[in-house]
Image (cartoon, rainbow, N blue to C red):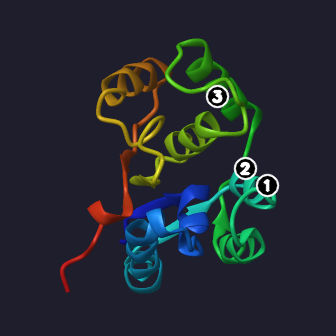
Amino acid sequence: MKKTVYLDSTLFSFYYDERSDSKLRSKITVDWIDNQSKYYDCYTSYFTLVELKNPVYPNWQKAAKLAEKYSVLEYSEEILGIIKTYIDHKIMPSDESGDAAHLALASYHEVDYLLTWNCKHLANANKIDHIRNINMRLGLITPLVITPEQLFMEI
């Protein structure tokens, strides 16, 4: 059985990012999506699709189209409660459709890995214990929140 991976919006935006200061992350992202994603069951969310359709991202149309190829995790009112709990406990910023939504969906659906380049709010070792504690109180499993460079299979 394949492990499951939730892809947040940063994966799709870095796939097409052409900024000079993003070259390494872009290269790793392209390599992971093109060569590694086949070893996992990959998902995204409605929140990712909406976020990528915002024209502030470089090459946002291409990024949105790439994201649409992945299965979308189901959203429910229960997930909205999880999002609010994350925000109330200050483990995520107050945007209900942003980082808190990505974490809530991945946790609720018991995804193995949440893949992101957001190292401030998600893939942050200083936050993981707090996230685990809140998820434990909620009866949720905490996915391993990591960057793509941490999830390469040895072939």
Q: What label does residue 123 carry, if any?
A: none
Q: Is mark 3 on a helix, strand or loop?
A: helix
Given contact means CB atoms under 8 Å apart, are the residues at marks 3 and 2 in contact?
no
| Above/below status of 85 relative to 109 | above
Residue furthest top in the image = 88
Give the residue at mark 2.
47
Residue 134 in the image, given as x and y percentages of width and height: 44, 20
Q: Residues within 10 Å of mark 1 (few under 14, many from 20)?
A: few
**Which quadrant, please, contains the C terminus?**
bottom left
Inspect the image, locate mark 3, and give the three-letter code of the amino acid beneath it: Ile
Give the residue at mark 3.
83
Q: What element carries label 2?
A: helix
Identified at 44% across, 17% down, the residue is: 137
Identified at 65% across, 68% down, the residue is: 71
Q: Nearer the viewer, residue 133 or 151?
A: 151
Identified at 79% across, 55% down, the residue is: 50
Give the residue at mark 1.
50
Inspect the image, locate mark 2, and give the three-letter code of the amino acid beneath it: Phe
Residue 6 in the image, given as x and y percentages of width and height: 51, 57
Given contact means CB atoms under 8 Å apart, are the residues at marks 2 and 1 in contact?
yes
Mark 2 to mark 1 CA distance (whole Å)? 5 Å
Q: Nearer the viewer, residue 48 or 6?
A: 48
Residue 115 in the image, given as x and y percentages of width and height: 44, 56
Residue 79 in the image, given as x and y percentages of width and height: 67, 34
Inspect the image, locate mark 1, and give the three-letter code of the amino acid beneath it: Val
